[in-house]
Amino acid sequence: MKKDTKVSLPYQQILHKQVIDENSPGTVLRDFETLLEFIGHEDVNVSGKYNLLPMKLLPQPNEQLTCPIEIWLTRPGQKSYPHINGLYLLLRATGITCIKGAGTKQLLVLDNAILQSWRGLNPTERYFTLLKLERIDPVDPEISRPMILETHGKAPKQYPVWDE
């Protein structure tokens, strides 16, 4: 069954008035860019069964986030930093990064084509792309082909309000 994607007029007016930039609504775009810059163009070693960021690297991006958290654990893992963990999962879901390598030598690598597509989106498109990815079931096959690559920097069809 197809979902009705029409947005009622009062909600359209609210959406048109909403300013979306790196600081509003919320700071997810700024923090996402912070993690993206932290990873940079150098491959990052990942560890464990789930290819998480290594413990020794986690304090750095935490300090650069809008709302860093204090960790008093002696061996904090990625899940101990919920903001980083969520942003990392979004980063992986966008396809901007992927895991390369085999065995114990796994690397988090940037996909430059998808990164370029991401950079072509305006803040509103970036925000709603992350919002959509946050709502996707992790085993959803849609994650395997990132939406931002499919749209080539244009508003995804799921958001008819953008078509104006």
Image (tube, rainbow, N blue to C red):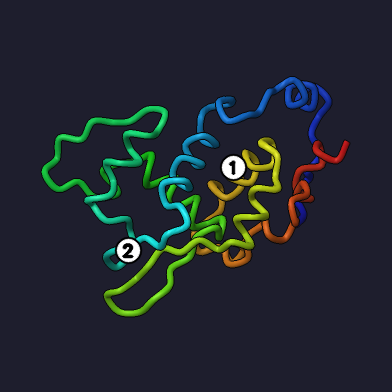
Q: Is label 2 in a helix, a strand or a loop?
A: strand
Which residue bears the numbered disc 1?
131
Labels 2, 1: front one: 2
Nearest the eye: 39 or 14: 39
Q: Position of residue 25 (x, y in %)?
A: 58, 26
Quarter of the image with the C terminus in it: top right
**What residue is shown at x 63% (from left), y 62% (from top)?**
113
Amino acid type, callout 1: Leu
**What residue is shown at x 76% (from left), y 43% (from top)?**
159
**What residue is shown at x 70% (from left), y 23% (from top)?**
18
**Residues under labels 2 and 1: Cα distance?**
27 Å
Between disc 2 and disc 1, whose residue precedes?
Answer: 2
Quarter-of-image position of residue 11: top right
Which residue bears the numbered disc 2?
45
Crowd class of label 1 (few under 14; some 14 to 19; many from 20; radius 10 Å): few
Judged left or right of residue 116, residue 12 is: right
